[in-house]
Image: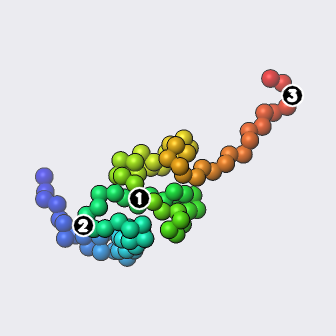
Amino acid sequence: MTARNYKREYKLFHSSKKAKLHRARSARDRLEVGLKKGDPREVDHIKPMSEGGSSKRSNLRAVSKTTNRKKGKKPGGIRKKLGGVRKKRAPTRKPKGKR
C-alpha cells in the first residue's frame, strides 16, 4: 500500500476555484446567521439551493449537525417536520376506462 500524496490532493481539489468558492460561500452564510468560530451548529437552507432556494437571511437558519444531516436530500416528509418548504406535487390522474 502506498502513502497518500496530500500535496497532490490539495493541489487537485482544495485549491481549485470551485472549492475556494464553496468555502467562501459557507463562511458568508455562517456570518449571515450569526454563528461564531467554534460554534458546532451548521447553517441550514430552509428551501434547499437544489430546489431553487437562496442564501438570503430569510432562507437560512442555524441547526445542529445531526438535524442538518437528517434533512439531507431525502424526499418529502422530513422537510415538513423540520419546518422547511416542500414542493407541491401535481395530482395524479387515473386513466379512464378499464380498471
**Residue identifier under label 2:** 9
The answer to which quarter of the image holds residue 14 is: bottom left
Q: Residue at x 35, y 47 (%)?
A: 66
Q: Earlier in the sequence, mark 1 or mark 2?
A: 2
- Residue 97: mark: 3
Q: Amino acid at mark 3?
A: Gly
Specify whether 60 is left or right of 67. Answer: right
The answer to which quarter of the image holds residue 34 is: bottom left
Q: Residue at x 24, y 67 (%)?
A: 9
**Crowding near pointer 2: few (<14 within 10 Å), some, many (20+)?**
few
Using the numbered discs, state the Cα–Cα distance from disc 2 to disc 3 in whole angstroms.
Answer: 61 Å
Q: Residue at x 55, y 45 (%)?
A: 80
Residue 18 lies, with reference to residue 67, above or below; the image says below
Q: Position of residue 13 (x, y in %)?
A: 31, 69
Q: Quadrant of the C terminus?
A: top right
Q: Amino acid at mark 2?
A: Glu
Q: Earlier in the sequence, mark 2 or mark 3?
A: 2
**Residue identifier under label 1:** 62
Point out the frontmost of discs 1 and 2.
1
